[in-house]
Amino acid sequence: MQRKKILLTAGAVGIGSVAYMMLKNRKKNDDITVVTPFDTMRYLGRWYEIARLDFRHEKNLDNTTAHYSLNKDNSIKVVNQGWNYVKEEWEVAEGKAKPRKKNTGALKVSFWGPFYDEYNVVEITNDYQYALVFGKNTDYMWILSREKTMPEIVRQYFVLKAQSFGYDTDKLVWPHHD
């Protein structure tokens, strides 16, 4: 009987610890470092979404892309699109982004009027061909490429970096591009 209580207590502590760590990891990533210096002009253009943590606005989407261009007010126009393979139709979302800190990959993006979310470019290759982007917490993450594919070594590096910040990369969605 005593052994059973000890095992139940240990199990409860273990489950509680795992739950705490999961909730803790979903908090804002204050310790991330964004790309600095960051060249906004080089970041403009089309990016293919290689992987993402799924959320309701991108659910069931393949052929997902993001296109960034400069607005007249120097904000960045954002056009995200993807093929909804369930509804069999294209979905498009238009928004805008602004730097949070000058010359860094710390941006804020909005698709809903005055409400902005964090968009953090945490890794980018020197040629601006591949990027790793974190959102405001560990629920949001994207791996982007200028082409529909990406070298395996870059993909693995981005996945490992995301894991080191508490991202559950087992839940990544790898959209098809055809």
Image (cartoon, helix red, strand yellow):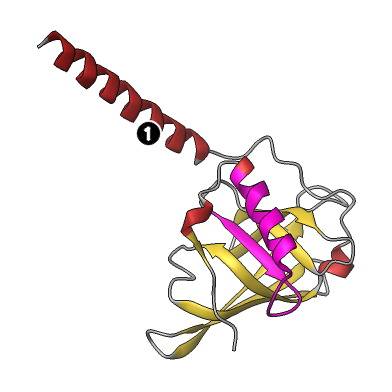
Where residue 48 sits: x, y (%)? 67, 76
Residue 147 is one of the magenta-drawn residues = yes
- The amino acid pointed to by label 1 is Ala
Indicate the quadrant where residue 147 lies.
bottom right
User: x, y (%) of residue 116?
Assistant: 61, 56
The N terminus sits in image quarter: top left
Q: Measuring 81% from the left and 47% from the top, which residue is drawn there?
A: 101
With respect to residue 161, does 97 lie above or below?
below
Quick check: 20 left or right of 76?
A: left
Disc 1 on helix, strand or loop?
helix
Name the residue at 43% across, 85% down: 85
The range drawn in magenta is 140-163
**Residue at image coords 82%, 67%:** 43
Image location of residue 167, percent across then percent down: 55, 47
Q: Is residue 140 visible?
A: yes
Q: Is residue 36 above or below residue 76?
A: above
Q: x%, y% of residue 96?
A: 68, 68
In this view of the protein, can residue 112 be seen by the observer?
no
Q: Is residue 126 magenta?
A: no
The residue that appears at 59% across and 56% down in the rendered structure is 141
